[in-house]
Amino acid sequence: MKLLQELYNISSPSRKEGKMIQFICNYLDNMQVSYCKDKLGNIYVTKGTSKSYPCVVCHTDEVHQNHTTNYEVVNLRGEIIFGYDSCRREHAGIGADDKNGIWICLQTLRKFKNIKCVFFVAEEIGCVGSSNADMEFFNDCRFVLQCDRKGNSDLITKANGLPLCSDAFVKAVNPKSYGYKPANGMMTDVFTLKEKGLGVSCVNISCGYYYPHSEHEFTNIQDLKKCLEFVTDIIRKCRSVYPHSKPERKQKRSLFEDDVFFGKPSFFQTGNIIRGWDEPLHRTYSFQVEYDDMLREMSDMLGNNINLKLSEIREILSGKFLQMRRSDYRLAYEEIMGCPPPNESAVFPKINTRKQGALLQEEVVF
């Protein structure tokens, strides 16, 4: 896990990804792999010579800002990795979204003689890199994989209502054999590539990170390794080209399609209730509950053999909200609605006063 922890130690906020891009280029140079970099910073890698290539993509940016001097990456019993600020005694985001994806790309480049990879910039602020991708690079690709999904079981075959792959490809990869299942997702680089006319099947795969876009983000190492095994298996057995074209999108009267938001309603706030479409969205979100659930989830992942109690994890992490961060509101909205907020300044009220060291217990009603 040395390479993974090195990636977690590199700050790469959107538009400030220079250190990460340089690290990747140095790594590729040491591997003696040919690559080119466009004016935006996207890195295109081709290893070997083949009539067709498997392709794996990722993005180099993260939502978290530059690390503090007290930032450290904590590997908890070889099972879970998270970031920690020892001075503030608080969680610190590690950018596993999408450094886990970078790690998988670099691992596949080491494993296979013939493969393509792309490292896209600025995905977190609107898929800027992939929106300007050189689409000719993908002309000889069999399929495109991206590992940029939370959890350990989602194979994203449809994003924002847009099908990404053929049924034949899903059948060939056999997701059930690795504990995955087809699911719907949101915007990411493979979605953008499909919108731009990518002519082969593509998917986005869960890669073991949890609570993305928040300070208490963490990675389950076994889930990340499982993702790498799944990707490795797909590359080894799927030797054919799996064509798939973007279907024509029909005009929809509804603002929703497959529970994914397409329209742009006007939101307004009444007290602590966010309203849209003239009706309140009756969903509640308690950050105290989320924090406790996260601790329990980590405890379950560590297993009984380690015999680490929930209270001990709480003491190790010392996670405290001094104030509500906008990223936490964004996370809440995405979890509940299944898409990013259409207008953050309108949707999220400001909370500036919190007792020091106290966890937020207020419920935000959407």
Image: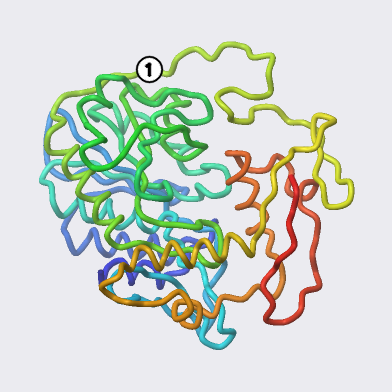
> Label 1, on which residue?
245
Give above or below for 189 relative to 19. Answer: above
Q: Quadrant of the N terminus?
A: bottom left
Left or right: where does residue 250 sit relative to residue 172?
right
Q: Please give the name of the residue rendered at 48% of the width and 67% of the height, measured from the top-left corner.
A: 295
Residue 4 screen position, x and y as percent: 31, 66
Q: Nearer the viewer, residue 42 or 163?
A: 163
Check disc 1 and report its element: helix, strand or loop: loop
Give above or below for 300 relative to 246. Answer: below
Left or right: where does residue 315 sit relative to residue 284?
left
Residue 35 screen position, x and y as percent: 26, 49
Left or right: where does residue 130 sit relative to residue 89?
left
Left or right: where does residue 326 sit relative to residue 78?
right
Q: Which of 271 and 18 is in front in this view?
A: 271
Give above or below for 348 relative to 16. Answer: above
Q: In which quarter of the image is the C terminus?
A: top right
Residue 36 screen position, x and y as percent: 31, 48
- Badge 1, how many Cα within 10 Å: few under 14, some, many 20+? some
Give above or below for 120 relative to 24. Answer: above
Residue 305 screen position, x and y as percent: 25, 73
Residue type indicated by callout 1 = Ser
Q: Please give the name of the residue rendered at 19% of the width and 49% of the height, measured from the top-left corner.
A: 229
Q: Please give the name of the residue rendered at 46% of the width and 65% of the height, measured from the top-left corner.
A: 296
Q: Please give the name of the residue rendered at 35% of the width and 37% of the height, measured from the top-left corner.
A: 155
